[in-house]
Amino acid sequence: MKPARWMFMAVCVLGVLALCGDPAFAAAKDSTKPGKLELSGAQRRMGLFEKKVQRMRGQPFKLGYEEKDALKRIAALEDKYPNDPEVKKLHDRARLALLASKGETAQVDKGMLRYRENGKILKEMFFKVAKGEWEAYKKKILSVEGTITKAFPQPSWEDEPFNKQIGKYIILEDFEYPTNEFSDSGRQYVFVGSGVRGFYYVELSDRNWLGAYEALRRYRRLISSDMPEGMKWTIVGKITGLTLLVPQAGKKKTRSCSWGWTIKLEAIFVPERTFAIADATLELGGKFAGEEKMEEVKGPLYTVKSIPDDVTPERLTEIFATAIKEKNVKLYMDCIDPRRRVTPSGRSRCMYHWDWHQKRFNEWYCLIKVAKAEVTVIQGFDEKSDLESRFLTEKDKAEIKKTSQPLVEHAELKTTAYDERGRQYGSPKPRFFRREEKKRWYITNYPQPF
């Protein structure tokens, strides 16, 4: 064997003997401890798992590749090194992260869902009234000579004198709005019928429709939001004429025009919900059954009826949520910054978001947790500030106050919502408040979901 090869083998042997005497090498051979590479790989993936938990801010989420890989690596380490303290620490971290991935939870009892039960009771009470009014109204309409109770087969304009149908009452079932809505010649209609059976065209461009339909909207806002617009209603109306229209939605018409009797709406009956009539003598143009006694019926169900002048942002948030749950519109509006509801469009926007808040509390969440508010001065001088008072005399404060702008304070807090199972819904949301000259607090970002 050549000398060079002997020297190479000698160096290798000496290196191995040196490593065997090295403590690090001895630890690497220790079967009770994980190697640095094994441990660091699991720790890095566990760190990514924990960062995702932080980003989700209490929301539940499904485990992805990185999260599952972290658990698999830690499980493999536990199988090989069950007594290693570093592996046990990783196990504890994995447990906490896995629990957090299921979402933050809260205890929800039956009392917290009482407002939903009250909503069902309210709906039943008003439908009982509606059913009675509908039966009485229908009896009156049926007593009128010539009332058409069977819409189909449709009275033919070719077979009967045109004037014979004008002014007759008709009861139409299967009225679907907005499903069968269409526009023609600059006017809006809903068609009832088909090409085979014939058509009736219910006018939506007059005050009668608006009066009755707005009454239905008030019912949905103030009594029960459980009234999908795609459902079938029964309507009562008067035949006003005969017209040739294309009963199809959209600007592009692909079907042929059809003759149909035009109907002026008088009343709407929504099965299992309510009954509304058009009434030109009323300021609002119509009403739903029991509307005149609405506050008398709902009043005893309110748990909060007013807002104290010294209300805190935290308590105002709770009152705001209660007003929505209990369908107390007056209290809801009183929580909102007056500047947001001074104009008609502003008030309309408030009611638009009222509808959305109703849906969320009825279907998505039921419990709200309110965090502590942080208050800052955004304009003027706060003479009651503990920090500034430490450096200013009473004379200093008086001089500053003479020239300062009116005091305006801003508050911010976060709310967290939970569903009926106690699981967190979405992420914590910010809520903003405003107060002027130490008067009452108001909510400024009222559209914000909880």
Image (tube, helix red, strand yellow):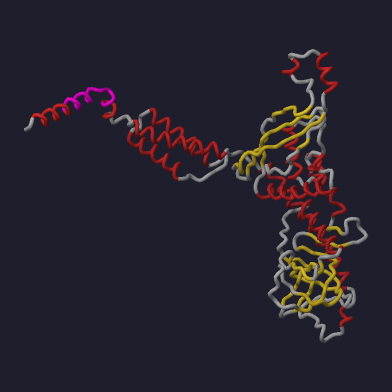
User: In the image as oriented, which residue stretches furthest toward the right?
Assistant: 281
Circle count:
0
Q: Position of residue 257 (x, y in %)?
A: 74, 77
**155 relative to 443, above or below:** below
Q: Is residue 24 magenta?
A: yes
Name the residue at 70% across, 73% down: 253
Q: Is residue 179 magenta?
A: no
Name the residue at 81% across, 68% down: 187
Range covered by the magenta-colored residues: 13-25
Per the picture, the main secondary structure of the magenta-coloured stretch is helix
Name the residue at 45% across, 32% down: 92
Q: Position of residue 184 (x, y in %)?
A: 78, 70
User: In the image as oriented, which residue stretches furthest toward the left?
Assistant: 1
From the viewer's side, name the closer residue of 16 and 73. Answer: 16
Q: Based on the displayed image, in which of its 4 quarters is residue 433 positioned?
A: top right
Tell me the quarter of the image containing the N terminus. top left
Tell me the quarter of the image containing the C terminus. top right
Would you say 31 lies left or right of 147 here? left
Would you say 119 lies left or right of 61 here? right
Q: Based on the displayed image, in which of its 4 quarters is residue 189 positioned?
A: bottom right
Q: Position of residue 368 (x, y in %)?
A: 67, 39
**405 relative to 155, above or below:** above
Q: Position of residue 5 (x, y in %)?
A: 11, 31
Name the residue at 27% across, 22% down: 23
Would you say 382 lies left or right of 419 here? right
